[in-house]
Amino acid sequence: MTGERTDAPGRPTTERVRGIFSNIAGQYDSFNRISSLGIDRSWRKELVKAAALTSTSRVLDLCAGTGDVALAVAKQAAPAEVVITDFTPEMLEIAAEKAKSYEGPTKLAIEQADAQDLPFDDESFDAATVAFGVRNLPDRAANFAEVRRVLKPGGRYIILEFSRPTFAPWRGFYHVYLRYVIPAIGGALTGDRPSFQYLNDSIRQFPTQPQLASELRDAGFTAITWKNLTGGVAALHTAVR
Ligand SMILES: C[S@@+](CC[C@H](N)C(=O)[O-])C[C@H]1O[C@@H](n2cnc3c(N)ncnc32)[C@H](O)[C@@H]1O
């Protein structure tokens, strides 16, 4: 990081990221559905499958936002408990409201927490999930170390994140979409176009699939695999503690 500007366009800083999500919390779900044409739901389903949960699993959902991953986990896999965490109270308030309508066997707990400094005991979770969150962390290595600490041996860390399409023409189209269409939709829905410009920049600066796998390996995870979704628009990494 030495010598790099912390205010560069796609670089996450705590203030910038929290400011963005507290501003757009109310419109976040609508933006997701419209901008991804609903595909984000099928990506979250894939994430739940990759977590390989059982009815006794205790799951930590990081950067949970408005709770879509946590609710998908509860509905699809019915583990014993999902702990829903995020550092932006405005996003968690919406998650809490949505969690009220969940009827099922899974206990849903909500806790404000920074994904780089987790307030949980060592070896206390069977799986950790994060969707569209690690890209927003200034210190990914700190997150990886914390997740390793709170996972039980053999526990899985499942990361769903925007990535790099592998087929060049598809990548070209996608980058045009990111650069022009996303800020236009986001700006129209929230009045906060710069936040969606940040989204474009942060996606383009994020590590490629093999680079992220290599960071996870450096952090001590094993059995790292990834699956490209929608031609690599997103990727699902699985890593074992
Ligand atoms: C793009 S949203 C993703 C929300 C949700 N996981 C989903 O799939 O829709 C990113 C979330 O990460 C949260 N976040 C960003 N940095 C964080 C950090 N350091 N600790 C905890 N949450 C963070 C933001 O508040 C925001 O709610």
Image (spheres, grey):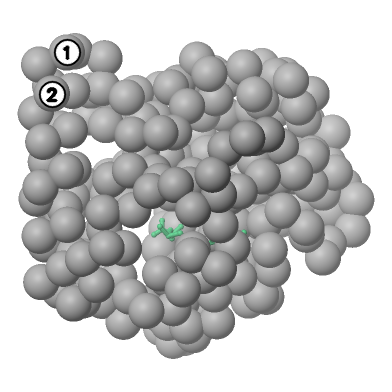
- The image position of residue 215, as x and y in percent, is 64, 24
Between 190 and 121, the one lying in front of the other is 190
Which part of the image, by quadrant, shows the C terminus? top right
Tell me the amino acid under the disc marked 2. Gly
Q: Which mark is residue 4?
A: none
In this view of the protein, which residue sits in the foreground, 77 or 219? 219
Question: Residue drawn at (66%, 75%), measured in percent from left and top?
Answer: 112
Q: Quadrant of residue 203?
A: top left
* Three-letter amino acid code at the position of disc 1: Ala
Q: State the residue position of label 2.
A: 172
Kindly indicate the quadrant of the structure image that contains residue 107. Answer: bottom right
| Mark-to-mark CA distance, 1 and 2 | 6 Å
Q: Nearer the viewer, residue 138 or 209?
A: 138
How far from the left and from the top, in percent, is residue 229? 30, 29
Q: Are marks 1 and 2 in contact (CB under 8 Å)?
A: yes
Q: Is residue 102 visible?
A: no
Closer to the camera in the image, 69 or 201:
201
